[in-house]
Amino acid sequence: MQDLLCAITDLVSNTPPERIRQLAGQIKTLSGPAQAAELSGWALTPGGKLRVRALTEAWKPSGIPAVELAGMMIGASYAYHKAKTEQAAELVWTGPSSELVATRKTEQALLQVIQGAESKLFLTSFVAYKLTSIMEALTAAVDRGVAVSMLLESSDQHGGGVSIDGIGQMEKALPTAHIYFWGDRPENFAGGKVHAKVAVADERLCFISSANLTGHAMEKNIEAGVLISGGSIPRNLHRHLEALVTTRVITRV
């Protein structure tokens, strides 16, 4: 059964739903796997032919009736494509390009999150400076009524681990934003830093990255991240950051 489930998964994840329904309709007409050779004409590509062959080989020892197999395929196809539309992930990369794999740039992804925010936006970074385009987007978000929150590492003059006072600069640039710092650290977190680099909007779109909020991170460094739209990850991330505020793990400046 495991082999059959794997074969179905491989087939539906590489085939449009309408083609799966077409194949399932053909399978329903068969008396069993002994007639599986009749399915060979369905596939239009070499990859498709291999997947159908794997399906039929896994079907033979399973004892599953043709009608049941067809239903399994249609159900798997529906579930796979529904889940795919609910959450999408995209690779983000800054630095030298291989020119073989298409990727989004860090600045583009971050701007998409900020510009897409409608009611609330939360960002975290170790440092933040020299960010003309990002600051313009944050200012525009504030102007259109978005509640902007930001967690940054404190400067070494304020007990933190970074020489630049990004918090002070951000307060001046975005006076109505909620700026937070991690001040009261328990003993088991002594010496810890705000090292997360995330941006999340409205619990529906988030960017998780290695990139700080700096010009070099946007343009010159090798940075990698993922842009996630929909599903539970943006929702849980946003709620977790807000819970850190509610439980006073992080403090507003």
Image: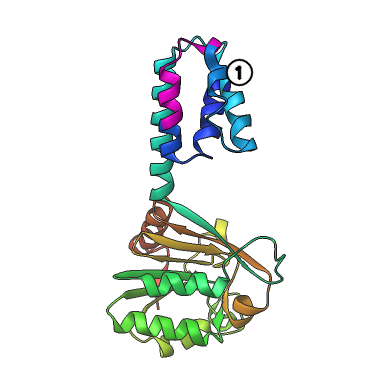
| Above or below: residue 122 compared with residue 228 | below
| Above or below: residue 95 compared with residue 66 | below
Magenta stretch holds residue 23: yes
The quadrant holding residue 179 is bottom left
Q: Amino acid at mark 1?
A: Glu
| Predominant secondary structure, magenta span | helix
Estimate the x, y position of residue 204 in percent, counting from the top left: 37, 59
Disc 1, SS: helix
Q: Is residue 140 visible?
A: yes
Which of these two is toward me, 75 or 224? 75
What residue is at 42 percent from the left and 90 percent from the top? 172
The quadrant holding residue 74 is top left
Left of 60 or right of it: where is 168?
left
| Above or below: residue 207 compared with residue 56 | below
Return the residue at label 1: 57
Magenta stretch holds residue 87: no
Of the 4 image quadrants, the one containing the C terminus is bottom left
Estimate the x, y position of residue 40 in percent, counting from the top left: 57, 25
Which of these two is toward me, 33 or 233? 33
Estimate the x, y position of residue 251 in percent, counting from the top left: 40, 71
Which residues make up the magenta segment?
22-34
